[in-house]
Image (tube, rainbow, N blue to C red):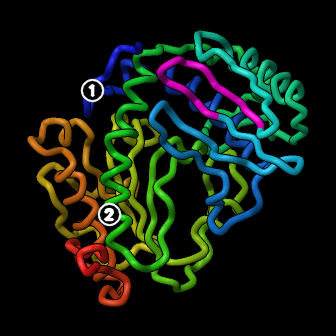
Amino acid sequence: MSEAVPRWPALPLDDWRETKETLHLWMQMVGKLRLALAPMANHWWQVSFYPTARGLTTSAMPYAGGAAEARFDFLDHVLRIETSDGGRRELALAPRSVADFYFEFIEALRGLGIEAHIVPHPVETPEAIPFAEDEVHRSYDPQAARRFWRVLVDIAPVFELWRGRFVGKSSPVHFWWGAFDLACTRFNGRRAPPHPGGVPNTPDYVMREGYSHECISAGWWPGGGGYEDAAFYAYAWPEPAGLRDAPVAPAGAFYDRDLGEFLLPYEAVRSEAQPDEAVLAFLESAYAAAAERAGWDRAALERPASYDPRSAV
């Protein structure tokens, strides 16, 4: 039996930065498999991963009249690739280069009869070494990877609760392998101005599709890219006037003017007696601040926190 990880574990970026960078690149390879196999959905929702009781999954991807699925297992520390005809391959999650992992991944797909174009380089990262040439990133600390997954397990139900309070269009609670974050996004139905793009090593059309409609998004990421430690975030696209000066809860949350987002440090949440409630307070207050200033029809888009249709049965 794998060693259990406590709820809301510590995850300082400096303790696992190299593992995070390597794991991020491995996940990009697998994410690009989903990009190749899954039919297009709005805002690229077809490419994301989902937290599971053991790690992260692509969910079933259509292939050759059946399905394929890839799952990162952070208890056994393997990547499992399975097909609906009974095929199965496993790749070890262990200290090894990105290039080594890439070649084994491609060979595993061939062994399963999966022919798919895997874009051979990372996106949304300042550095974009082709996977086949990357001998730089080669770290993997299994305990750090497991703590990272455990944080996702703790956070996801809070985001699901927040999502359930919205009756308008909202995204799944999903993990983006490009930005390496868990997120959920609410929409009001109105078209948005074209996104300017400018994300490193990413075509501008990717961001324009992702932000084609007005939205308020919230999520969590493990640090890096402008803020060096794990944090919850929330922002609106486009940002309404006055948002950056709006108060948000709980204590410790603030607006980062460089990032253009509200932030709540993960460490501040861990110290709370009820971390779930602290996260929910952040999500609700940041959303309310943005929705009010952007003129959203909140009465039509939201349901009471106490709403439960089963109570009427």
Residue 6: quarter of image:
top left
Q: Main secondary structure of the magenta part?
A: strand
Quadrant housing the N terminus: top left
In percent of the image, x 71 and y 14: which residue is there? Answer: 135
Residue 207 location in percent, x, y?
63, 62
Tell me: residue 89, above or below residue 120. above
In percent of the image, x 50 and y 60: which residue is there? Answer: 172
State left or right for residue 182 relative to residue 266. Answer: right
Circle number at residue 2: none
Callout 2 crowding tier (Cα within 10 Å): few <14, some 14–19, many ≥20: some
SS at badge 1: loop
Nearer to me, 211 or 65: 65
Q: Is 10 included in the stretch rendered in magenta?
A: no
User: Are the two marked residues, 1 and 2, in contact with CB atoms closer than 8 angstroms?
Assistant: no
Tell me: residue 201, above or below residue 91. below
Residue 202 location in percent, x, y?
69, 50
Callout 1 crowding tier (Cα within 10 Å): few <14, some 14–19, many ≥20: some
In percent of the image, x 36 and y 67: which residue is there? Answer: 164
Q: Which residue corresponds to mark 1? A: 10
Tell me: residue 45, above or below residue 66. below
For marks 1 and 2 on the same chain, the one whose residue lies earlier in the sequence = 1
Q: Which residues are magenta?
A: 71-83
Residue 73: quarter of image:
top right
Nearer to me, 154 or 282: 154
Residue 181 location in percent, x, y?
47, 45
Residue 23 location in percent, x, y?
57, 26
SS at badge 2: helix
Q: Which residue corresponds to mark 2? A: 162
State left or right for residue 43 relative to residue 281. Answer: right
